[in-house]
Amino acid sequence: MTRVDDLERPAATKQRTIPAPEAGTRPTKPVRDARVDVVRGLALLTIFVDHIPRNAPALLTLHNFGFSDAAEIFVLLAGYSSMIAYGGLFRRAGVRTALVRIAQRCLRIYLFQAGLLFATLVIVRIWMDITGLTPRFGVAPLLQMGLLPGLLRGLALNALPNYLDILPLYILLLALFPLIYLGMRRGIWGVLALSATLWVAANVDHQLNLPNAAAVDEGWYFNPFAWQFLFVLGAALAVWVQAQDGLLPRRGWAVAMASAYLAFAFFQGGSWAEWGLPDLRPLSIGVPDKSHVGPLRLINMLALAYLLFSIPAVARLSRWRRLRLIDACGRHSLEIFAAGCLAALIGRILYRTFDATWPLQIAVNLGGLAVMLGLAHLLDARRRGAAAPGRDLRRPG
C-alpha cells in the first residue's frame, strides 16, 4: 500500500518509513517542481482573462477546449504543493512547527481575501457614485446589503461574491490538510475513498454545502464537499510522483485512454457556436456541473494530470528559460492572483462603462497581463536577492 512515508524515499529503495529528525535540526526547503509552478502560473493568467465577461481572449482559454478550466487546475495543484511543502515539514520539523506554518499560511490567504473584498467593494461603490451605473457582476449582492454589512458578511465568509470565492475554498482545504496528511500516513486509498464518498454525496444532494448569503437559495459556488476531492487527489498525486522519482509510470494504454478522453472532451465541450463554426458535439448533453465538479469535469482533470506528470518532455519544457516569468507567477501565486483579481475588476468596470470595444479589450488584456508578469518579475528578483549567501529562505512556498 502506498503511504505518505514514501514521499521522500528514492524510487529504487524499499524503505517505507522516514527516520525521525535529529534534535535541533531545521527543516530544509523542498525542491520545487517546475511543472507545478508553470502550469499554476498559466492557470492564474487564464483566470484573469476568464473573469472579464465579453472578453474575446476568453474564447481561447482552457474551458473552451474541454470540460475543465483553470479553477480545477488551481485546486488540484494546491493539494499537490501542500503535500510537498507541509507533508514534508511534518516529518522533518514535527507536528507543532508544521501546524504553525499552515496556520500562518491560512491567515495570510485570509488577509489577501479580506483586502481584495474591501478594495473591490470600495472601487465598485465609487464607480457607482461617479457613473450612476449598477454592477452586473461580483459584489452587487453585498452592496445591496449596505457597504459595511456586506463587508462584514464577506469577512465572515458567509457571503462570497462571484470572482472572490476561490480563496475561501483554499483556506478551508488547507486548514483540513493536517487531517488529510494524518489519514494518508495510515493509507492513501482509505482517504481517497472517504473523499470520493463526500464528492458523490455533494453531487447527489446539492443541499450539502456551506451557506452563502450572496447567492439566493445557493451555497458556496465552489462547493467544498465536492472540491475537496480534487485537493485530496492532488495530495495523493504528490506522493505517487515523488515515489516514482518525479514521473508517473508511462503506460501506452493509459496515455491512449487519457488522450482519447481529452479528444472527446474537446469535441463535446468546444465552444463551436462562439467560434462561429459548425457544432461538432457528438452527444446532446448539458454542460458538466462546475460547482460540484461533475464526473466529466473530474475525469477531464485526471486525464490532464496523468499526461502532465507522466511525459518527460513536459518536465523539460517547464524548465525552459522563456517560461521563467510564467514560472514566477506560479511561485508567487497568492500575490499574482490578487493582482489578477483587481485587474479583472478594472476590466469589468471599463467594459461596463465604455462597452467592450476592440481597442479597449486589447488595452485591458495587455495591461492586466503586464501587471501580473511585471509583479512576478519584481517578486522573483526580491526573492533571489533575499536568497543571497547568509540569508535563510526555508519557508515552504
Image (spheres, rainbow, N blue to C red):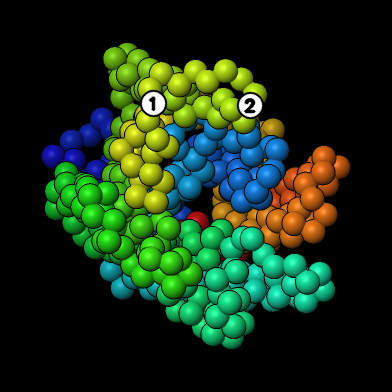
Q: Mark 2 belongs to which amino acid? A: Trp
- Left/right placement of residue 156 relative to residue 370 reads left
- Left/right placement of residue 326 relative to residue 172 reads right
Residue 176, image x, y percentages: 30, 64
Residue drawn at 48 percent across, 69 percent down = 214
Quarter occupied by the N terminus: top left
Element on which disc 2 rests: helix
**Residue denoted by label 2:** 275
Residue, far right: 359
Element on which disc 1 rests: loop
Residue 291, image x, y percentages: 39, 51
Q: Nearer the viewer, mark 2 or mark 1?
A: 1
Residue drawn at 35 percent across, 15 percent down = 256
**Residue denoted by label 1:** 284
Residue, far bottom: 148
Viewer-closest of 387 and 370: 370
Viewer-closest of 286 and 320: 286
